[in-house]
Amino acid sequence: MKHKKVLAIFAHPDDVEQFCGGTLILLRQAGYQILITALTSGECGTTTLNSLEIAKIRDKEAKRGTKIIGADYQCLKVTDGIVGYYPGRLAHSLTGQPYLYHSDPQGLIGEDGQIVRVNTIVDITSVIEKKIIAFSSMI
């Protein structure tokens, strides 16, 4: 594969570091170019700051975390709290991709209502400290 690329899409700016930061660090070390995309700015993630204030903080945190991972970052700025989970729509939009890795533990129910069995476990022991540092960038 000439151009090795990974697109990691998550709802909130800190989700990537939490759910698959170690895997992305390993992929970066293997030469993959990584783009992390947050759908929302995470503006519902506080009860003490207004949405603009927390969005600015989350953006800075996300950029620090993705820099540690070695990735590029973008936020689509969809309003937090209104994103729905539509597995059929997502799967359809990603048709033709060589590999789809799903790391969200809340999404382990398939379209047929059955539990999706985990068949891939990634050993991140060699990069766990770096993953913790990346996740720690989220206050």
Image: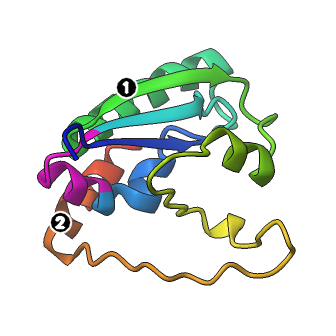
Query: CA separation, marks 1 and 2?
Result: 23 Å
Q: Nearer the viewer, mark 1 or mark 2?
A: 2
Q: Residues within 10 Å of mark 2 (few under 14, many from 20)?
A: some
Point out which mark residue 125 bears.
Answer: none
Query: What is the three-letter code of the residue carrying label 1?
Result: Lys
Query: What is the three-letter code of the residue carrying label 2?
Result: Val
Magenta stretch bounds: 24-33
Magenta run includes residue 30: yes
Which of 48 and 117 lies nearest the eye of the viewer? 117
- Give x and y (percent) for residue 27: 23, 55
Point out which mark residue 127 bears.
Answer: 2
Would residue 112 be found to the left or right of residue 53 on screen?
right
Would residue 48 be visible to someone looking at this image?
yes
Would residue 85 be visible to someone looking at this image?
no
Q: Residue at x 41, y 37 (%)?
A: 36
- Give x and y (percent) for residue 132: 28, 60
* Residue 62 drawn above or below residue 116: above
Q: Quadrant of residue 18?
A: bottom left
Q: Residue at x 28, y 34 (%)?
A: 64
Earlier in the chain: of badge 1 and badge 2, it is 1
Magenta run includes residue 107: no
Point out which mark residue 60 bears.
Answer: 1
What secondary structure is marked by label 2? helix
